[in-house]
């Protein structure tokens, strides 16, 4: 069974490559993915401006999975003002109150990002 799933995945990747299709960047944000493996996906502490550590690095990595114009965050583990601006934008894109606080709803959005947000990123 596992071999069949692996074979199916390889065939799908080869087929999409041969046809010129690309997999969206957001696909790597899947909770089962190791693309952002700073901490387990089920550990979701509340984060605010000024927090530091692996949970902040995880949120930075996941927020970088978003497409569009927002700048990529440096994975430094420091919740600074650039990260705050990006988190607030992501919250607005999903209809979450724009608090800048990363809690349950925001974590869920970070792990399952929209393919694109049609709100312009603030200057």
Image: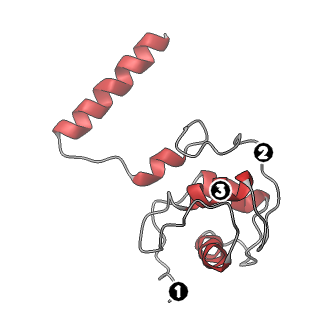
The residue where tag 1 is placed is: 122
The secondary structure type at the circle numbered 1 is loop
The quarter of the displayed image where residue 82 is located: bottom right
Choose between 44 and 80: the one closer to the eye: 80
The secondary structure type at the circle numbered 3 is helix
- Residue for point 41% across, 53% down: 25
- Left/right of residue 79 with respect to residue 3 in the rendered view: right
The residue where tag 3 is placed is: 57
- Residue for point 29% across, 25% down: 11
Residue mark closest to the camera, 1 vs 3: 3
How many residues crowd around disc 2 within 10 Å: few (fewer than 14), some, or many (20 or more)?
few
Q: Residue furthest bottom?
A: 123
Q: Position of residue 9 (x, y in %)?
A: 38, 26
How many residues crowd around disc 1 within 10 Å: few (fewer than 14), some, or many (20 or more)?
few
Q: Which mark is residue 52?
A: none
The mark that comes first in sequence, 1 or 3, is 3
The secondary structure type at the circle numbered 2 is loop
Q: Position of residue 106 (x, y in %)?
A: 71, 62
The colouring scheme, among rainbow, by chain, secondary structure or one colour, is secondary structure
The residue where tag 2 is placed is: 43
The quarter of the displayed image where residue 43 is located: top right
The quarter of the displayed image where residue 15 is located: top left
The span from disc 2 to disc 1 (Cα, nearest Å) is: 30 Å
Q: Position of residue 72 (x, y in %)?
A: 48, 67
- Left/right of residue 22 with respect to residue 2 in the rendered view: left
- Residue for point 44% across, 19% down: 5
- Asked if disc 2 and disc 3 are in contact, CB closer than 8 Å, the reply is no
């Amino acid at each position: 069974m596992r071999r069949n799933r692996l074979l199916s995945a390889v065939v799908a990747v080869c087929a999409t490559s041969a046809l010129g299709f690309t997999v969206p960047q957001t696909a790597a944000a899947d909770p089962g993915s190791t693309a952002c493996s700073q901490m387990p996906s089920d550990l979701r502490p509340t984060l605010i401006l000024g927090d530091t550590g692996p949970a902040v690095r995880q949120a930075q990595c996941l927020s970088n999975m978003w497409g569009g114009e927002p700048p990529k965050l440096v994975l430094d583990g420091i919740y600074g003002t650039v990260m705050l601006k990006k988190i607030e934008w992501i919250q607005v894109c999903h209809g979450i109150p724009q608090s800048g606080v990363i809690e349950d709803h925001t974590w869920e959005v970070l792990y399952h990002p929209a393919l694109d947000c049609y709100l312009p990123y603030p200057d």
